[in-house]
Image (cartoon, rainbow, N blue to C red):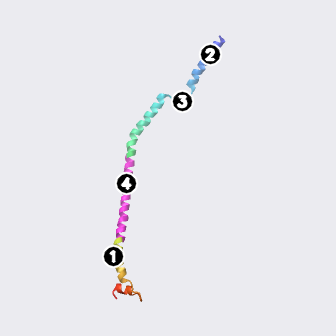
């Protein structure tokens, strides 16, 4: 009977050994997945809304920057068109340069 007792002890140790192992049960994993899903369902739309709003704000800033650059270009082009004839007329004629004297009207 000594052998029979050792077999029972082995079975008990196997059962208790499994209970002492560390790990997660299926129910615990499902609960965690459910909690994560609920959090994502509540937070997800807000995050997507913030992302779309930030893209719109970035686009508005880029349009304003382009508008400012276009205004500066327009102002410089107008000044260039207005000032070139004035500079051409007001420049002193060089001696010995017949073309310059004719252009000025001398």
Q: Distance between the residues labelled 4 and 1?
A: 38 Å
Residue 85 percent across, percent down from the top left: 34, 79
| Residue at x-position 36% and y-position 64% | 68
Work out whether mark 3 precedes mark 4 in sequence or the reverse, and give the earlier one. 3
Neighbourhood count class around disc 1 (C-alpha, 10 Å): few under 14, some 14–19, many 20 upward: few
Q: Which of marks 4 and 2 is nearer the N terminus?
A: 2
Estimate the x, y position of residue 77 in percent, counting from the top left: 35, 71
Q: Which residue is the site of mark 3?
A: 23
What crowding class fits label 3: few (fewer than 14 Cα within 10 Å), some (14-19), or many (20 or more)?
A: few
Q: Say which element carries label 1.
A: helix
- Point out which mark residue 58 bears: none
Identified at 37% across, 55% down, the residue is 59
Pointers 2 and 3 in contact (C-beta within 8 Å): no
Task: Name the element at disc 4.
Answer: helix
Disc sitting over residue 57 in the figure: 4
Marks 4 and 3: in contact by CB < 8 Å?
no
Which quadrant of the structure image shows residue 23?
top right
The Cα atoms of the two marked residues, 4 and 2, are separated by 75 Å
Range shown magenta? 49-76
- Residue 60 drawn at (x, y percent): 36, 56
Q: Nearer the viewer, residue 67 or 105?
A: 105
Say if mark 1 contacts mark 2, CB within 8 Å: no
Marks 3 and 1, how far apart in space? 83 Å
Identify the residue position indicated by label 2 in the image: 7
The residue indicated by pointer 1 is 82
Q: Position of residue 66 (x, y in %)?
A: 37, 61
Does the residue at mark 4 contact the one at mark 2 (Cβ under 8 Å)?
no
Q: In the image, is 21 to the left or to the right of 29?
A: right
Which callout, 1 or 2, points to the residue nearer the camera? 1
């Amino acid at each position: 009977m000594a052998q029979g007792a050792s077999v029972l002890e082995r079975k008990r140790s196997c059962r208790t050994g499994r209970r002492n192992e560390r790990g997660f049960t299926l129910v615990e994993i499902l609960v965690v997945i459910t909690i994560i899903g609920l959090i994502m369902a509540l937070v997800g739309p807000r995050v997507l809304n913030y992302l779309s709003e930030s893209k719109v704000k970035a686009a508005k800033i880029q349009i304003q920057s382009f508008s400012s650059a276009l205004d500066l270009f327009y102002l410089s082009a107008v000044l260039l068109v207005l000032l070139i004839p004035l500079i051409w007329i007001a420049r002193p004629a060089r001696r010995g340069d017949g073309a310059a004297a004719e252009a000025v009207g001398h």
